[in-house]
Amino acid sequence: MTDEDVVIEEQASSRTARFATWLMEREERRQERETSLEGLVKLNVMVSFLTLGLVGGFEAVRLGISLIPYV
């Protein structure tokens, strides 16, 4: 291998390493977003059932919970 081949190979490997690092960071950010979205969805469901309980009473909450598997 010539010096030029070695330089080209080092550039390719560093480019690959940077790309791999970028992919890993992107995946971590995506997982953090999903975690926060899951928390917001759980909060929304809880508040919805509390509102349903206040407006419709306990029977309405029981009916809503029984219909969850069909959603």
Image (cartoon, helix red, strand yellow):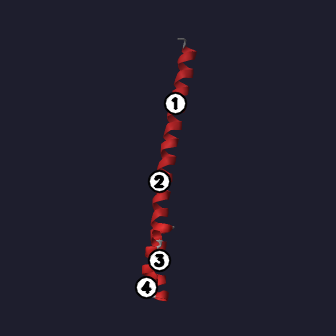
Read off the residue under disc 3: 64
Q: Residues within 10 Å of mark 1 (few under 14, many from 20)?
A: few
Which of labels 3 and 2 is toward the front?
3
Question: Which of the two labelled residues, at mark 1 and mark 3, occupies the earlier sequence position?
Answer: 1
Under circle 4, the secondary element is helix
Give how far apart the Cα atoms at labels 3 and 2 are. Answer: 30 Å
Q: Position of residue 37 (x, y in %)?
A: 49, 63
Q: Position of residue 5 (x, y in %)?
A: 56, 16
Reply above or below: 54 against 13.
below
On screen, residue 59 above or below 7: below
Badge 3 or badge 2: first in the primary sequence = 2
Q: CA distance from mark 3 to mark 4?
A: 9 Å
Q: Are marks 4 and 1 in contact (CB under 8 Å)?
A: no
The answer to whether the residues at label 1 and label 3 have Cβ atoms under 8 Å apart is no
Decide: is 71 above or below 16: below
Callout 1: helix, strand or loop?
helix
Of tags 4 and 2, which is closer to the observer?
Answer: 4
Task: Label 2, secondary structure: give it.
Answer: helix
- Residue at label 4? 59
Say the numbered circle drawn on residue 31: 2
Dot 3: element? helix
Q: Nearer the viewer, mark 4 or mark 1?
A: 4
Label placed on residue 65: none
| Front-most of residues 17 and 28 | 28
Residue at the disc numbered 1: 14
Q: Residue at x 50, y 37 (%)?
A: 20
What amino acid is at disc 2?
Answer: Gln
